[in-house]
Image: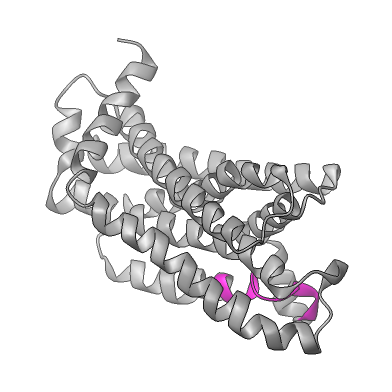
Amino acid sequence: MTAVTLALRPLEFFFAQYRRVWRGTAITSVVTPVVFLLALGVGLGVFVDRSADLPGGISFLDFVAPGLLAATAMQLATFESSWPVLSAIKWDRQYHAMLATPLRVRDVVLGHQAFIGARLLGTSAVYLAVIAAFGAVSSPLGLLAIPVGALVGLAFSCPIAAWAARTENEASFVAIFRFVILPMFLFSGTFFPVENLPAPLEAFAYVTPLFHGVSLCRMLTLGDVDLLPALGHLGYLLAFVAAGLTAAFYTYRRRLVL
């Protein structure tokens, strides 16, 4: 079998597993963006638009909606690559069952990340449809926010999966959500320009993958794409994916084979 065929086997397994719970996650994928956009983009946005000047004179809804798309992808990817990965190694041991077949560690990593990527594409598509219904997509280029949202998620899921394959304690995932994901959610340009932050937090924002994902999604939904900065954001996200996959290949192999 080819390498692609082998990687598709774990993907098929995770989709078969997902069939049991997809209804619950589908409802969440629709309800969450609607609630966020009503509360922040529409409710709070009325007051922000009266008292603040956002870059380019755009409305708060147009500013925050693409940021929420990217931030949601980050949160989904972080969850999918933490507890489920440790479970597949330590508790339910699905990875061990896969490796008892001709599958290699590389196939298991790529297959699971492909499943997470597919989840991210679906969630990003739903989110984009919702924000478009709210009038927060000003250009056909906004459709590209769907794969960008998936890329943002993979920039988190690959390195976090590498960590999940290394750790023995699920408590570290709580720490990741509390001290890494939550600060990024708040201070990476989702809700306000990072230039308004104190200098240390502004510097922190610039090095986070979420900032680059938010900026790129916002460019696309507004139809205001500056090519060189856009390529810089894209390259930064791809670098995180590549580094995360490389680390995952190593930690998975060390945990499952050596």
Question: How far across and down, in percent of the image, does residue 122 sit?
Answer: 43, 45
Residue drawn at the location 68% of the way across and 61% of the way down: 207
Left or right position of 67 against 251? right
Question: How far across and down, in percent of the image, does residue 116 sit?
Answer: 39, 44
User: Can residue 239 be seen in the rendering of this structure?
Assistant: no
Residue drawn at the location 64% of the way across and 42% of the way down: 144
- Of all residues, the one furthest to the top in this rendering is 1
Residue drawn at the location 40% of the way across and 66% of the way down: 31
The image quadrant that residue 201 belongs to is: bottom right
Q: Nearer the viewer, residue 124 or 130?
A: 130
Left or right position of 239 against 21? right
Quarter of the image where the N terminus is located: top left
Residue drawn at the location 45% of the way across and 62% of the way down: 75
User: Can residue 242 be seen in the rendering of this structure?
Assistant: yes
Q: Is 136 inside the magenta-drawn segment?
A: no
Quarter of the image where the C terminus is located: top left
Q: Nearer the viewer, residue 202 or 12?
A: 12
Is residue 125 depicted above or below 25 in this figure?
Answer: above
Question: How far across and down, in percent of the image, does residue 95 sit?
Answer: 21, 38
Question: How far across and down, in percent of the image, does residue 53 sit?
Answer: 84, 80
Is residue 111 depicted above or below 155 in this figure?
Answer: above
Q: Is 191 inside the magenta-drawn segment?
A: yes
Residue range in magenta is 185-196
